[in-house]
Image (spheres, coloured by chain):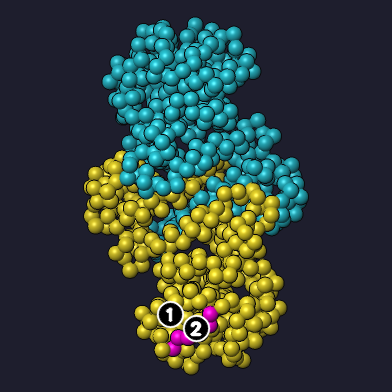
Chain colours: A yellow, B cyan
């Protein structure tokens, strides 16, 4: 960014760059598939060395690496490429924080479904054009894939949420994890609080992934499951905490309020609903990651959205909650809303 | 950019943003198709007003507009959207500099061909996987589309090039326009220099577009054509200027040198080859628009590339040219190389 306030002369560069932006997505997918970042972490630096390691052409490797420098995933000095701090942490397959698997889910949900192939039609309609309910149809196999692939992205948020809600205090808690997916949010609470019992709700096939993760985390003896739709299955009662993570963005306000009424009824007095969401500021255009998530929901769901805190606050008040407060996970995207019965 | 030198804490935001970058391309395509920018230029400002004008849903319109704010094409104040200076100039259909049509060509060349659907395979191979020659196959109809749709992007560069080479001096010139496409580069010289005669070379179907443009520009009486492949058709001789615009990037060095030998032979003593190209700096990663064009060539051609000035200079010296000089078109992307016989 230039510090000057002089107007820039007109340029078609942003138009050109945006019309080719799909190549950024393709380049990151290709680099992860070829395990290019891991090869660089192993000490291969030049196009020739890297090409030999990833079994690709030297020219293709050079062009891909240069492109990854331009879009911020590598650095370059002379003919040598190196990882950025973020690429080293998240894209080297040998890193414990490796996120390569999320490329698979995001490709499936956004691209392989064709959800954005005719975005003008989506804008005309006001929702997805890939079937009635888009990705939230019953037992959609995409959520098993989600549970498998997106877990790595959620380790840090799940740990942060357990801390935000004071799981370390060790109180006897009954926790409902709605649309648990990989189960990491409930599991993190069980790990922080040895007196927490977790009840995980999701499609039966998805719960197999959550149960496996609970087993790995050593909390399976305090982990039970409720298979089915969050809108239909009975929750039980007297929960201290209800986790609603990355779920409400799929639905319209009326549907969310029906769910939140059920959640309110299932909470013990003083219980809390804990919502992890893409929550843009009231201007709806910042922060960029949170705000642009409304486009993902427009393209892939019938009625979903990235709701503002004011909108969530209203949904919770309308359904009986006393008050809600918002917590940042910064520098991670997403925010946490804690709502009190 | 922050002025601080403190390291940023790790964040998956760039990975997430890049995996969704294809939505930027989709959003700009949709906005152009829906003529959203023109509606805003007409004074429609709110999602409701805009939705009524573009015959779309209010929600879809709001989400699209917010997304266009995030990626730099609109501004927002309260619920009102407005155009940026560049959007006003290039994306309002009523602007004489309207560039909306280039969205069509860039979608065709990059996306509809599927050239980037399996970029890992492209990197392995070192060139396009969509047929032997990608987009440069004989008489590929994509170039008629190119000639129709990309002309608006080339008005300013063609005018600048005419000035750079001194067309206004009015000398008697014979100009060869190789792979003329829409013809604008030769036509601009004819407009600046009333004593210039233009010979345009391209596939016969493409030349129909160039001839139409020459007619519109009032220079048809100094405009003749050579239909066929630049590699096969006889150029004739004694040219003062040979235009080679956005052509050499499609081929390997050997193929380019064969062409440049033909060009050298066709030039009069003291004649000049004038090349418009995406020419990255020697680091191959800047400027971003020029440097990232190597990815477009990797995906869509068998052997093309974004060559550096050192590489072009060598090709011209190897084929008999005395020297080459490079000119900036800044702030426009692309650069001009003038090579002297």
Q: Which residue is mark 1?
A: A211
Q: Quadrant of residue A99?
A: bottom left
Q: Which residue is mark 2?
A: A225
Q: Earlier in the sequence, mark 2 or mark 1?
A: 1
A8 in magenta: no
Considering the image in quadrants, where does the C terminus of chain B appear? top left
User: At which x and y percent is residue B131?
Assistant: 41, 36
Q: Are marks 2 and 1 in contact (CB under 8 Å)?
A: yes
Residue at 33% over, 42% down: B125
Q: Is residue B26 visible?
A: yes
B191 vs B264, nearest the viewer: B264
Mark 2, other Cα within 10 Å: few <14 / some 14–19 / many ≥20: some
Residue at 65% over, 73% down: A256
Give how far apart the Cα atoms at labels 2 and 1 are: 8 Å
Instruction: Check residue A16 in the rendering and tell me which mark sits there, or answer none.
Output: none
Q: Chain of mark 2?
A: A
Characterize the magenta stretch by its predominant secondary structure: strand
Note whether B100 is above or below B28 in the view shown: above
User: At which x and y percent is residue B145?
Assistant: 56, 30
Secondary structure beneath dot 1 equals helix
């Amino acid at each position: 960014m230039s510090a000057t306030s002089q107007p820039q002369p007109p340029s078609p560069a942003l138009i050109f760059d945006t019309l080719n932006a799909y190549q950024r997505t393709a380049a990151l997918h290709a680099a992860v598939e070829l395990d290019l970042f891991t090869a660089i972490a192993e000490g291969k630096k030049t196009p020739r060395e890297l090409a030999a390691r990833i079994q690709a052409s030297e020219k293709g490797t050079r062009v891909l690496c240069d492109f990854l420098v331009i879009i911020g995933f590598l650095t370059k000095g002379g003919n040598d490429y190196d990882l950025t701090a973020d690429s080293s942490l998240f894209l080297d397959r040998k890193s414990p924080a490796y996120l390569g698997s999320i490329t698979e889910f995001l490709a499936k949900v956004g691209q392989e479904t064709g959800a954005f192939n005719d975005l003008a039609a989506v804008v005309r309609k006001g929702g997805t054009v890939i079937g009635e309910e888009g990705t939230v149809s019953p037992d959609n196999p995409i959520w098993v894939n989600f549970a498998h692939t997106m877990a790595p992205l959620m380790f840090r948020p799940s740990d942060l949420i357990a801390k935000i809600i004071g799981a370390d205090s060790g109180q006897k808690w009954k926790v409902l994890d709605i649309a648990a997916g990989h189960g990491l949010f409930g599991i993190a609470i069980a790990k922080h609080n040895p007196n927490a019992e977790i009840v995980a709700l999701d499609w039966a096939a998805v719960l197999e992934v959550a149960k496996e993760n609970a087993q790995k985390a050593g909390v399976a003896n305090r982990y039970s499951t409720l298979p089915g739709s969050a809108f239909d299955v009975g929750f039980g009662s007297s929960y201290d905490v209800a986790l609603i993570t990355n779920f409400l963005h799929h639905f319209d306000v009326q549907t969310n309020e029906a769910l939140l009424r059920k959640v309110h009824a299932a909470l013990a007095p003083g219980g809390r609903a804990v919502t992890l969401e893409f929550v843009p500021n009231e201007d709806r255009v910042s922060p960029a990651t949170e705000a642009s998530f409304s486009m993902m929901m427009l393209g892939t769901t019938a009625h979903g959205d990235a709701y503002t805190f004011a909108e969530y606050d209203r949904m919770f008040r309308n359904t009986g909650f006393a008050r809600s407060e918002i917590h940042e996970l910064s520098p991670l995207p997403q925010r946490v809303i804690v709502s009190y019965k």
